[in-house]
Amino acid sequence: MTDVKALQQERIGIYHDIFDNKIPKRVPVDIRLTFEVIAQLGDLNLLETQWNPALIEEAVDKACQILYSDICPFIGSFRYPSFYQLLKSQSFQMASNGFIQHPEVIGMLPEDYDYLIENPYDCLLERIIPRQYKAFNPNDPINMAISFTKSLLAFNNDMQQAGAIIGKMVEKHGYYPGGLLAGGFTEAPFDFLADQLRSFKGISMDIRRMPEKVKEACDALYPLVLKRGMPATISNYATVFIPLHMAPFMREKDFATLWWPSFKRLVDEYASMGIHCTLFCEQDWTRYLDYLYDLPTDTVLWFEYGDPKVIKEKLGKKHIITGLYPVMNLKTKSKEECVAEAKRYVDILAPGGKYIFGFDKDPLLLSDINLENLCAVAETVRDYAVYSNPGETAGMVFNKNDYKAEPSRKIESKYYKTWEEYKALNPEVSDFGAPKLQGLEEAIFNYIMYLLM
Amino acid sequence: MIDLKELTQAVGELDEEKVTEMLTEFVSSKPTEEEAQKVVNACQQGMGIVGDLFEKGEYFVGDLIFAGELLTEAINILKPVIGGQSASKVGTIVLGTVHGDLHDIGKNIFRSMAEAAGFVVHDLGIDQPVENFVEKVREVKPEIVGMSGVLTLAIESMKDTIEGLKKAGLRDGVKIIIGGNPVTKEACEYVGADAFTTNAAEGVKICQGWVK
């Protein structure tokens, strides 16, 4: 076996141990750099590279050579300009520095609640997407069809280009062939409702003015976000990534009645199928640690803030902890301080296993970090965070039979058909077409949902 | 006559229904401008309670957003009776989200609360280039400049903006406060600001301390 293959086997081993409730040989080092950071590292024009993701390959390879990580540090981008531009997006726009962001925009009005609750997918397509994507204009149907098709082709093209680069790097550098986006991607029902439908301000009004409708809307959206997050194949190692957003900005009583129930149900339902979730606990979740404890065993909790000691003590035996190390340290502190800090985090979080080293958040631009400090931290963790008792059982053990899915309503919409429904309407179609046609149906569904995430 | 204490209390409790009802009744009683001004002050004091409850950890960002909206509604109801004169201003702030960042929720909360506290706020908007800050500061001569940002990259933009104010010879004439998710004590020193906060209510208190 070549060195690279041997390294890859070691990496697969340490990640799988984590999910198999074993103490790994050493703490996995999960370091990701955004598309923008890597483009800057390669001295590339950010704008040009975002339009042609294939251009970034050499810069990715350079990043892989100078920076230690057990996963590929490049995960592509969620937000390329092509597909948002083609649909004239209001909700994803490029700032003056070439960085695509989500400004506060409203896709759904208070008077849309009843229709959303009655017929969620129809409401997304008929009312919300046309507000957020001006080229998805039902009053100009032929141009709308053309724009949507171009946008989907662009999306597939850009994602495939980035995916191909990741694949090459995983092979070349022997990375763990999993990571953040290897499974599925979705949002909590409440966050889906808040982020691009009602907006931060809108949902803050609704929580006080019409909490019942908010609750019903979360239940109505539940089957859609559940389906959106489903991994292509179920495995103990590929997680569903769910970035969490609104909870820290709410009062606990609103959180407990409006945010939490549909989310808990979501994670439980995935667990009942043997799927783990990776939750990015954005902002400060200290108030909610007891709730997080109640989630299925081996949920990956990526914290942005919090006291590592408290988190380890409360959650460390049940869940897999990552994050917390403040990425801003890499810019504001000396190399020695950064390294000492990394050891401090490891000393607190590594004992007993169920820990993956990571930063509180991914750096957004190269100027956010001092690269030398970053490399020093990554190498320190690799060499320092080594266990003396690999193979021993780490904390609580996950069993999918401990979790049950509550029955939920079927997705019924004139814009989405199962194969059976399609076949009933088109009895002449050969069953040989089923996988292909159903696959395309799912691809469109996933893209529509992606546009609102 | 309207019970000002009760009104302040209702604003503090974010009781939208009660506030609206009290103010609508007040307006229909054809009050004098002076009486109306007292009612505006009572609403502003209610916002002070909101700020205190936020600092105590009883209210959160969503509640501050709601409070800002409630105050705007309250002022709209009162408009016909407030007359032309505005409350005495305590100071002027030039505010904006720095270049490269499109986020404005935190900035808008700070603006509502600063206005409620009697500041005149010139809000430049989001993704503002250095020269826009410089020009506005030159034009309105504020006591305070507030810079907002959510993304880590905003730190570098804040530094640029402060450098720009220095170059224009305007830095020493103003106090600078930075706010938003990525700001820390270290970031504050790094960019050369006078204060930092991740808490709009605290930010307003810092500003009040500066103009006393």
Image: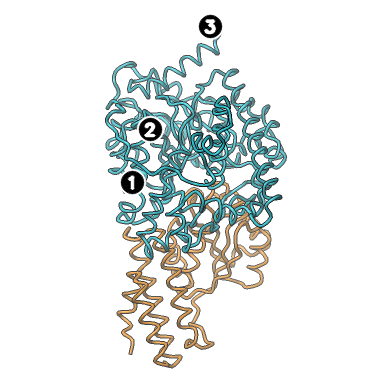
Chain colours: A cyan, B orange
Q: Chain of mark 3?
A: A
Give the number of the mark in front: 2 or 3.
3
Residue corresponding to mark 1: A286
Separation of disc 2 and disc 3 at Cα? 36 Å
Quarter that holds the N terminus of chain B = bottom left
What residue appears at the point 50 percent right and 67 percent down from the top-left corner?
Answer: B111
Amino acid type at mark 1: Thr
Identify the disc placed on residue A344: 2
Quarter that holds the C terminus of chain B = bottom left
Q: Tell me the quarter of the picture where residue A340 sits.
A: top left
The answer to whether residue A182 is seen in the rendering is yes
Separation of disc 1 and disc 3 at Cα? 46 Å
Relative to residue A351, is residue A94 depicted above or below? Answer: below
In percent of width and height, residue A81 lies at 66, 44
Q: Nearer the viewer, residue B64 or B160?
A: B64
Give the number of the mark in front: 1 or 3.
3
Q: Nearer the viewer, residue A228 or A249?
A: A228
